Amino acid sequence: MELSCCLWALTANQSHQTAIAQVAELGFGVIDVQPQTVEPAQVSAAGLRVSCVALSHGAPEDCSLDDEDASSLSRALSHAYEALDYASTLGATTGYVVPRRGGGVASLPRYAGALALVADRAADHGIRLGVEHFPGTALPSVAVTLGFLREVDHPNLALLFDIGHAQMSRENPAAAIAAAGNLLSYVHLDDNDGVEDLHQALTDGIMTRDSLAHALQAVETSPYDGPASLELNPQLPEPAAALAGGRALFYDVASSR
């Protein structure tokens, strides 16, 4: 399994171009990006590839994919479609969306309808669409999100698994990954205190080396064959050091199994 890096961990105080160079220096070969932030030539010049795009990033705050208002929904869809077009130019194979914070279960049928449209467009680009389980939304856990995805039953709609979010929802990461089966579309690695979505460096919170090892083993024995990605907080005191440490730990754990 290869390890990717969410580029936004390094963009709090420097340009995306500088961050790209720094990621390459740290030894990563793959990155995740946000829409409209980097150019394909910048990525290829650094010897990197883009694996995943955070499609929800930068969406207008006054609309969402579960909106009742047709005009607002149209704007949310337009953002998603433009983000997919951008992801395609970068050669990304995966994109993901995040449910609206505070959204209730009554919004899920509308969300399902919009996601089916976005998943269709993603398929046209050869991109698999993931939905991230997110505490504080209508899809707060892996279990709830998998139930939703199975009910929607779209062939190009799957789960983005975030180990930090699983810690917050008190789900066993390895068991949750195994439960996802062929609905696993991507993996985010980060740590926290089990309460707040801190995106700390690996094992700086409640994650242990053993829990990480069990999760990675579950990924490797699942049908999923893509990378995992470090998604760390850009406000960490030393984000580059946190990425370097996470990368070293990831490959040390992977090689010792």
Image: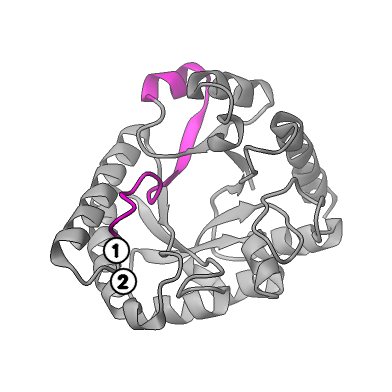
Residue 175, quarter of picture:
bottom right
Residue at the image point whose x is 31% and y is 39% from the top: 88
Please state which amino acid type lies under the numbered disc 2.
Answer: Tyr
Whole-percent x, y for residue 101 in the image:
45, 65
Dot 1 crowding, Cα within 10 Å, few <14, some 14–19, many 20+? many
Residue at the image point whose x is 76% and y is 49% from the top: 202
Q: Is residue 139 magenta?
A: no
* Residue position for label 1: 65
- The boundaries of the magenta stretch are 39-63
Q: Answer yes or no: do the residues labelled 2 and 1 have beta carbons within 8 Å?
A: yes
**Front position in the image: 200 or 152:** 200
- Using the image, tell me which numbered label, if any, was put on residue 111: 2
Please state which amino acid type lies under the numbered disc 1.
Answer: Leu
Q: CA distance from mark 2 to mark 1?
A: 6 Å
Side of 187 where 97 appears, left or right:
left
Residue at the image point whose x is 48% and y is 73% from the top: 139
Q: Is residue 53 magenta?
A: yes
Whole-percent x, y for residue 170 in the image:
70, 75
